[in-house]
Image: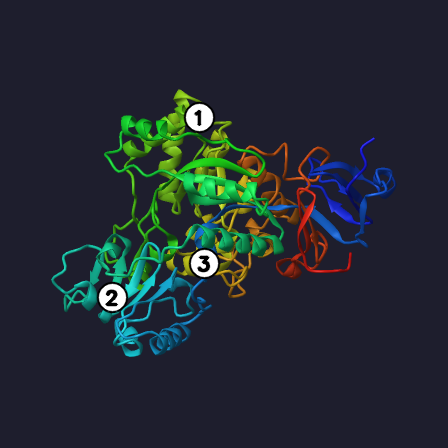
Amino acid sequence: MTYADLILLNGKIITVDNNFTIAGAVAISENKIISVGSNSQVRRLSGRKTQIIDLRGKTVIPGLIDSHLHPEMASLSELDEKIPDVHNIDQLLTWIKEQTLVKEKGNWIIFPKSFSTRLIEMRNPTLSELDSVAPDHPVFLNGSFGGMINSSSMLISGITNKTDHTGIIKDKKSGLPTGLIRASAFHLLKVPQQKEHSYQEKEDALKEMLKCYNRYGITSLFSGMGDFESVKLYRNMADKKILTARICQNILLNIEEKITRASVAKKLKKYEHKTGFGDEWVRIGSLKVLLDGGILTGTSYLQEPWGKKANEIFEIEDPSYHGIINYSREELLAIVSVANEFNWSFTAHATGDGSVSLLLDVFNEVNRSKSIKNSRFSIIHGNFFSKEAIKRMNELGVYANMQPAWFYKDADAMEYILGKEKIKTFHPNKSMVDAGVIINGGSDHMVKWDANTSINPYNPFLAMWTMVTRYTEHGIVICPSEAITRQQALKIYTINNAFASFEESVKGSIEPGKLADMIILTDDFLSCPADKIKDIESFMTILGGKIVYSSTTEF
C-alpha cells in the first residue's frame, strides 16, 4: 500500500474533472495525486510520516495556468527602478518631472509600455506638455507599436521637419513633428542600449518573479515569445530545483531572408526540437509570429477601417486605414504550411478581426493538405471575434488565447473609439464557449511586478472576475450577455490551458494520477460574492506536492 506524503482534509476540493466534482479531501504521494474523495476514504492512506493539513472548510482548486505572459521581460522590468502606476496625464507628467531631478541632463527618460488609451484623458501628453516638464531630457513613452517623444528626443535623434518617414507624424499645417511616433520609426531614436544583465541576474530575477506568480496560485505558464536560449535557462533552473512554475515556451520565428516555403523549411530544420519536446517542468510550445500591431496604438488590423475616432485618439487621418499587417497572405501561408508539415503547433499575435480573419483563411487552406484539428493551433489575443470567425475556429479546432484583463482595462476605450456595434464582438466569451471554442486565459504580463497594477495585470482572479461580471476598470458593465459562469472561467485557467500544451492528462484538474499542483484559497471561488472574486489570493500554493508559497502558519 502506498501511503500519502501529504493529505488535505475537511475542505471543498473543486476538482475541475469532467463532472466538476466537489470532494472533501485529497492525498498526495511524491509529486502525484493518489486519491480524491471523502475524508474517510483519503484518511486510510495516512501513515506515520504523512503530513496532514486540516483545511477547516477552505476551498482548494487546481494550480492555475497562465496561457500567455513574458516573465523574462517582466522579471527585469523593475530591477533598476520602479515604474509608476499612472492613470492620468498629471500623474505621468509628475513622474517625468521627478525623473529630471534625479537624472543628469541629456539622459533618457523612458516609460515602457505607455498606452494613452489607458489614461483617463484617453490621449498622449502633447509635445508642449512633455517639453514643459523635461526641456533638457529626451523622453520616450514607449507603447510597443507606437509612442510619444519630446523635442529633446528629436534633437538628439536628428528628427526634424525634413525627416522623411511615415512613422514620424507631422502636423498638417506646420509640417512639424507632433511627437507621435510609430513603431516603424523607433529605430531612428538614439536611445541607449538596454542594460546587459548577467545570466545569474536573469536567473535570480526569474526566480523572484515566479514566486510572485505563486502567490496568486499560478503553477504553470506559457512564456509567450522566447527562444531556445530561454528553454535552456528554464531547464537549468529546473535541474537546480529552483523552478516554482512549470514552463511551456513558445518560440518566436524570425526569418531574415525573403519568406518562402524554402526559407521557412531551412529555418525549422535548424531547430533541434519542436512542439511537445521536454518534460513536466519545461517543454516547447507553439511556433509564433507577430501578425499585426495593438489595439492601444491603433495598429491592430481590422476588417473595417478604424474610423473617425482614430484620428482624434491616434492622429490617423486616412479614412481607409485598417491598421498594420506584418505578413502578406502568401508569406503567412508559407510559414503556417511548413510549420504544420514539421509537426509544430502554430500561433500568432493577432489583435484585430482583420488579422484573425486572415489567419483563419490560412489555417483553413493549410488544413486541406494536412489536418490541424488536433494540433491545437491558436490565436493569441484576437480580441474581436465575429460569429463567422467563432464558427470557423470551432470547425478547425483553433483555440482562443485571450487576455481577460484587456477587457477590464480597455473595453471602455474600444467602445468609445469603435462604437457600440463593434464592441459586441470584443471578448465575446459566452458566444465562444457556447460554440465549443476552447478559450485559454492569459495575462500578457510584460512590465512591473505587482499582480494588479502591472501594465497588463497577471492576477488570474481579477481576470476570472472580469469574465464573470464584465466589469471594466472604470466600473462600467459592457455586453453583460457575454458573461460566463464561475465554473467556465475556472476551466479556462486550468484544464483548458492544460489542453493548449497537450498536458490535459497530467495537470489542469485534481484527479488521481495527475501532478499534485493545487492551491488553497483565501475565499470560496464558487460561492463568495461575485465582487470578492478579484480579491482572492492563495493561502498556500502546492507544486508537485511541495509547498512553494504560503501566506500563513495556520495549517
Position of 163 relative to 386 (above/below) = below
Decide if residue 93 is on the left or right side of residue 285: left
550 or 470, which lies in front? 550
Q: Amino acid at mark 3?
A: Asp
Q: CA distance from mark 1 to mark 2?
A: 45 Å
Q: Quick one: SS at disc 2?
A: strand
Quadrant where the C terminus is found in the figure: bottom right
Q: Amino acid at mark 2?
A: Gly
Question: Mark 3 sits on what residue?
Answer: 410
Decide if residue 56 is on the left or right side of residue 118: right
Nearest to viewer (mark 1 / mark 3)? 1
- Is residue 466 at least partly visible in the picture? no
Disc ID at residue 343: 1
Quadrant where the N terminus is found in the figure: top right
Question: Mark 2 sits on what residue?
Answer: 179
- Residue at image position (50%, 37%) is 399
The disc, 2 or 3, on the residue closer to the chain's N-terminal end is 2
